[in-house]
Amino acid sequence: MAQQTADRRRRGVIDIVTVVMLSLTAVLTAWCGFQASKWGGEMSIAFSQASSARVQATNFDGQARDARQFDLTIWASWISATAQGEGELAAYIEDRFTPAFQTAYIAWRDDGMAEGSPLERPEYVPAGSAQAAEWTAKADERFQAALENNQRGDNYSLLTVLFALVLFLTAMSQRDAKQWVSRAFLILAGVAGVSAIVIMLTLPIKI
């Protein structure tokens, strides 16, 4: 009689542990699904921002190319006027240099005209170049953030699989089987559950 009472008590404890594990695992599975969804949304937003930034970078890069082409045309005219000894025309053309080219031209002239043209000077930064570099950097940053957010979502999705394994093992421990088999399934479920919780605690949270 005492043995039966002990067995019933032991079985009652196991049943309580099983219910707690099933309930907790169900909640954590839902939480992981929620986090995977949130990080998936963040990934989409970051990809959209990266795409928008890339368009802006392309626009400014086109502006820089146009500015460089204009400066190149003006420079060719200046070279032609200078070669033909038309100083007045050359001075007229100089007055129409763009600010970026004017800065490079002065540096080129003061430095002994060592380079082939002011276009080769580091001081020459056509309009739109800085903005293109800035937007390109922003696009790269948002793209990298999108990849990280995607990985975070995948990590939470993998955790839902691990928690599903916990549910499976816990359910198997309730089947009519030898006591040691039920305990083995329950212990495996506990180990898997604790491992999943530890991993989950290391992951970032998005509310």
Image (cartoon, rainbow, N blue to C red):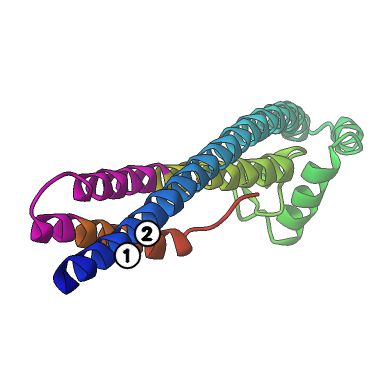
Q: Residue 115: image x %, image y %? A: 60, 51
**Label 2 belongs to which residue?**
16
For mark 1, give the secondary structure: helix
Residue 202 visible: no
Image quarter for residue 128?
Answer: top right
Residues in magenta, as a range: 157-185
**Does the residue at mark 1 contact the one at mark 2 (Cβ under 8 Å)?**
yes
Residue 129 placement: quadrant: top right
Name the residue rendered at 76%, 60% in the picture. Answer: 110
The residue drawn where x is 54% and y is 37% is 37
Residue 158 part of the magenta segment? yes
Residue 95 colored magenta? no
Q: Residue at x 25, y 67 (%)?
A: 10
Residue located farthest toward the bottom when viewing the structure as drawn: 2
* Residue position for label 1: 13
Residue 174 in the image, given as x and y percentages of width and height: 23, 48
